[in-house]
Amino acid sequence: MCGIIGYIGKQQATPILIEGLRRLEYRGYDSAGVAVLQNRELATRKKKGKIDEGLAKLVQANPIYGQVGMGHTRWATHGPPTDENSHPHLDQSGKLAVVHNGVIENFDSLKERFLEEGHTFKSATDTEVLAHLIGHHYDELMKSGKGNWTGEGTHPLAQAVMNALREVIGTYGIGVICTDHPGVMVGARRGSPLIVGVGEGEHFLASDASAIVSHTRTVIYLKDYDVVTLFPDKFKMDSLGSEVASFQLSKIEFDADAAERGKFAHYMLKEIFEQPKTVQNAIRGRLDAEDGTAKFGGLNMTTAELRAIDQIVITACGTSWHAALVGEYLIEEFAHIPVEVEYASEFRYRNAPIEKNTLVLVITQSGETADTLAGLRESKRRGHRVLSICNVVGSTIAREADGGIYLHAGPEIGVASTKAFVSQVSVLTMFALMMGRIRMLSNRRGSQIIKALEAIPDQIQKILDQSEEIKRIALKYAHAEDFFFLGRQYNFPVALEGALKLKEISYIHAEGYPAAEMKHGPIAMIDEKTPTVILAPTDALYEKTFSNLEEIKARKGPIIALATEGNDRIKEKVEDVIYLPATWEPLHPLLAVIPLQLLSYYIAVARGCDVDKPRNLAKSVTVE
């Protein structure tokens, strides 16, 4: 989950590294550091805390100059956030530096070995042990006379990295530089994302495209076991695996402006307000009004193969798991295919009986989520077809799935996911429509779904236009320490998502439940200090939801209702109402989630929380 940025070329490295780290800070913000080759020596600056509060000030007060360097922003795994535990870390000799994203599982035994050999360690991290291991293998190469490089074959620094990684158990995305080779940088990955940015007379190494998009849009997404050696004017690929190293040049889909906050105070708010465009991008070119269906170009499955599916298993984490729950309702409603939704972190370790004609869907924003990737690989190992719903072209999950659907949501920088959720639900709606049309759904019903879906962007904008009123309501309840979110059927997953958003960014305890489950225990917690957000659209179960509302009101619980426009009756029963445009019932989650995101955002801001960098969280969970 940490962020890595590296530069080798003709420019001064430090400003590029600091800029890249700012763009990567959503991946970790416990501490940050840089290492630059300055006059053939390693100059390092490391500081606990957020970049602008720590590292940037340190570098400004004590500059470093050089054209080769690496930076790192940390989400702590081994060792607490301290200056000493910040990356980069050096080997025993002090001439080799390493930045690392991932977990070295056997670092204890390696560290014990080096302690017996007289090594000293300055941190509690597994990464420093890795640096010592690479340094050890580099020294061995030097002693054996294999340290000279003639320009052919594997560079000795890359060879030392490869020799070291063969001893490693765990995951890594790493960058390595050495004072003996001021014109070389080595990168390697297994399980943690790493990309190469290709420029003219310069190259970049990064864990995310957003860090380098202002410098180049030509990239190589490294595969597991890839090892890349970067020079200013060229690069060389090696592989720790059995296959010959290969690579493919790709283009970053978004530009630098898309990764900026613009006029918004936070990335999260910007991304909330981007959601009309997000839905438009998700559905563009995929709806066929004449046939009343949806079409996707990357599924790599024939109509006959899709029709033969008897069951669908969806696996995901966090917000993507909530989108998957909406997908379960949609697919079972439209296509009459039984669906199971699994937490990826549980699914990967279960020996669940899955029938032969089962399709596995994996949903992820980043395409690098460790648990979801493991679920994908386990499903393929068992012989099941796996499709991905993913936002990042070139990501590991997108590459390893048998086929998939891209969200085209653009970069999502805010740690609390917003626009990815509506993109995922939009894609799942279209997938359910397609599956329904090849099985039993009528053309007329398909056309109705398309018409309703095409209206969603304007309806979302109508809700966003109420942001000041939603802000007023949020400020009214910003003091609360407990919240409930209730919804039925399609709106139950939205209730879960609303509770998650509030917990993530405001640190208020919040729970989501099916509305009818409130009386089976949780209602004991209701009092005049505990607000409830109840999703009460005018649908087939409205009267039952209204009865649940009455039960809460009878116990003096304050209520914020999300209701369909024109419902004046509900005003008499609740403290506050947020009105949503009328839509077809299965599409209500695409509208209902918007005010819940805004409520969470405005409450968090009122409480003084950093909504883009909530405590203990990072954007892309690439470690278990």
Image (spheres, grey):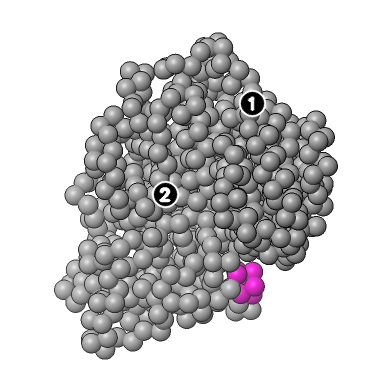
Which percent across, then down, holds residue 212?
Answer: 53, 52
Q: Earlier in the sequence, mark 2 or mark 1?
A: 2
Type of the residue with mark 2? Tyr
In this figure, what is the number of numbered marks? 2
Which percent across, then down, holds residue 143?
Answer: 19, 77
Which percent across, then down, holds residue 50?
Answer: 60, 70
The answer to whether residue 323 is magenta is no
Using the image as rendered, state which of residue 146 and residue 481 is in the foreground: 481
Residue at 33% across, 41% down: 400
Q: Which residue is mark 2?
A: 343
Looking at the rendering, the stretch of residues picked out in magenta corresponds to 50-57
Which percent across, then down, holds residue 327?
Answer: 49, 35
Secondary element type, mark 1: loop
Q: Is residue 23 left or right of residue 403?
A: right
Q: Residue 258 — which label?
A: none
Determine the image quadrant of residue 12: bottom right
Please say if the residues under marks 2 and 1 sit with CB atoms less than 8 Å apart: no
Q: Crowdedness of circle 2 by 10 Å Cα count: few (<14), some, many (20+)?
A: some
Type of the residue with mark 1? Trp
Residue at 60% across, 50% down: 518
Residue at 49% across, 67% down: 75
Q: Is residue 571 visible?
A: yes
Q: Crowdedness of circle 1 by 10 Å Cα count: few (<14), some, many (20+)?
A: few
Using the image as rendered, state which of residue 475 and residue 49 is in the foreground: 475
Q: CA distance from mark 2 to mark 1?
A: 28 Å
Q: Which residue is mark 1?
A: 584
Q: Is residue 34 above or below residue 547?
A: below
